[in-house]
Amino acid sequence: MSTINVVVKHQGKKYDVDVDTSATGEVFKYQLYSLTGVEPDRQKVLLKGSQLKDDTDMSKVGLKPGQMIMMMGTPGEGGGAIVRPTEKVKFVEDMTEAEAAQQAGATPAGLQNFGNTCYLNSTLQVLRSIPELNDALKSYKGEQSMMDPTSQLRNLYDMMSKTQEGIPPIAFLNALRVAFPQFAERERDGHGYAQQDAEEAWSQILTQLKQKLKISEGDAARDASFIDKYMGLELTSVLECDEPGAKEAGEEPKTSKERLLKLNCHIDGQTNHLRDGIVNGLVEKLEKKSEVLDREATYTKRSQISRLPKYLTVHFMRFFWKREVQKKAKIMRKVTFPHELDVVEFCTDELRKALIPVRDKVREVRKEEHDIERARKRRKMNPIDGENAQGSQSSSSKDKKKDEKKPTGGDVEMTTEETFKTDAEFEAEKEAEVLAAKKELYTLINQDLLKDEGANQSGLYELRGVITHQGASADSGHYTAYVKKTGIKDPVTGKVGEEDGKWWWFNDDKVSEVEAEKITALAGGGESHSALILLYRAIPLPSADGTQ
């Protein structure tokens, strides 16, 4: 290993550094980090007037013994001098079960199957992925009874947070069966409990939580329902008679509002995508008596969404009652669904007017961020090509300047020297533009929606959970759940890191990690696992200062 001793000057101090010429600029920056406490990504090291890059080959920069190198930069939050940890380092082998379960990236707990209880296990796993629900349950001070499903759900989630093993949800299951006897139904032969529909379990649990789980609304006279606030949507419907005679006789369309906890995806022979099913579900044909015609008539009920919750439940209506076999049969048709859902088109004109500016700005900001990231990757992969491209652009610009400045007489016109931006300066400029765009995005959020903490403010949702069913009927088969992995939370700053795009697959007490492609394969088309319930979450929007 060949080294050259140089002097690095930073904030008035000088440091003697032995540079390994076989290493890269990134290694050199980490040497400086150990001396100055300035993180590598916050350093600006100047060599011959240009900024040192991470992938620079140190053998090709022409370093000389004793050469003075300038460094700029300050430590970020939590940076600075390297200090001894305040807490003793503890290895996983020395941790308690609860401590190990709460480590970043730990495999979450599964739930044991007590005989046809997979419908409940999958439902509980997807609901547990809602952090606001977990927080609200921790604060629940209602009925402390063994037969209270809400308090038993709180206890169950608390136990699940302290282990990585499969645990028995027996206390919650007993409370649920007392509150809703349908889940205590026995098999026809009397041996064990019957399989149930996960959608019914989902709906009944939300109904129970809607009644019991209240959260403070600040200055409001009474507490609000957590479920209504974070998971409740509102439909505005117009009911109109299809027969011209009713309109001619003076019958007016009737407008009504309805609060729901899920959006239905109706499946017929023309349904290929989630959007098709939602459109089908928002138009309904009814038979009812017309007062003006004094007889039964056909009516059309057209609905639009007038309030979007932060968490949107979408139900694929795959099961229907088949009279011949006297049970719920399953519609096998393949219906695809997106990882990001845009529901703006299903909203009322008033709500669309509030959502569209924010949605469009979100897409604009994303494009700018994507362009910056793509340029950064291109420079890392082809640093020489990037420099050649920049050099040829500069050369062309210089030639043009020369042509413009050619003297026409005897006098020579003096020109100022042209300056060029480094990659780092160009990138910093683009990032500043993105930050400004995010601040502008915040100003576009509708004020009424901004006050509603539990509402979606952009009309865009990201998929977070899926409950699947395998089999040919609701009364048989097997249910599992998929939950998207969250980013790792920094214990010092509290910031959540980027997600890796992978998912947890909960198959009762068996929990495994799967790729995102597995979720795409849940569209159905046979008796294999197909999506029954989707849980979407409103995409996060920046705050007033442009941060997430």
Image (spheres, grey):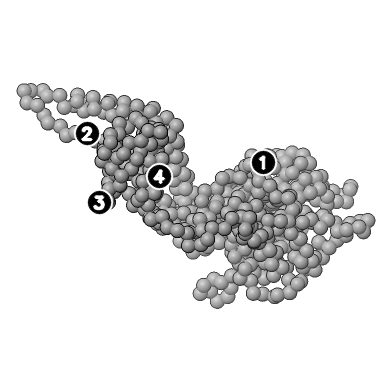
10 Å crowding of disc 4: few (<14), some (14-19), many (20+):
some
Of the numbered discs 1 and 3, the one sitting upstream in the chain is 3
Disc 1 crowd, CA 10 A, few/some/many (<14, 14-19, 20+): few
SS of the residue at dot 1? Answer: helix
- Residue at the image position 58 percent from the left and 47 percent from the top: 341
Q: Secondary structure at mark 4?
A: helix
Mark 2 or mark 1, earlier in chain: 2
Left or right: 235, with 541 as reference point: right
**Label 4 close to label 2 by CB (< 8 Å):** no
Residue at the disc numbered 2: 418
Q: Residues within 10 Å of mark 2 (few under 14, many from 20)?
A: few
Question: What is the number of the mark on residue 244?
Answer: none
Distance Cα–Cα, label 4 vs label 1: 39 Å
> Percent x, y for residue 379?
41, 33
Q: Disc 3 or 2, which lies upstream in sequence?
A: 3
Which residue in the structure is indicated by mark 4? 30
Question: Is the Cβ of the residue at disc 4 closer than 8 Å to that at disc 1?
Answer: no
Pick whichever, 10 or 50, lies toward us.
10
Q: Which residue is rendered at x = 41% and y = 55% of the image? A: 82
Q: Secondary structure at mark 2?
A: loop
N-terminal-most mark, 4 or 2: 4
> Height in image: 65 above or below 351?
above
Viewer-side residue, 317 vs 362 = 362
- The amino acid at mark 3 is Gly
Picture coordinates of residue 120, whole percent (x, y): 75, 57
Residue corresponding to mark 3: 12
Q: Quadrant of the N terminus?
A: top left
Residue 409 is drawn in which quadrant? top left
What amino acid is labelled 1 in the image? Answer: Lys
Which of marks 4 and 3 precedes in the sequence?
3
SS state under label 3 = loop
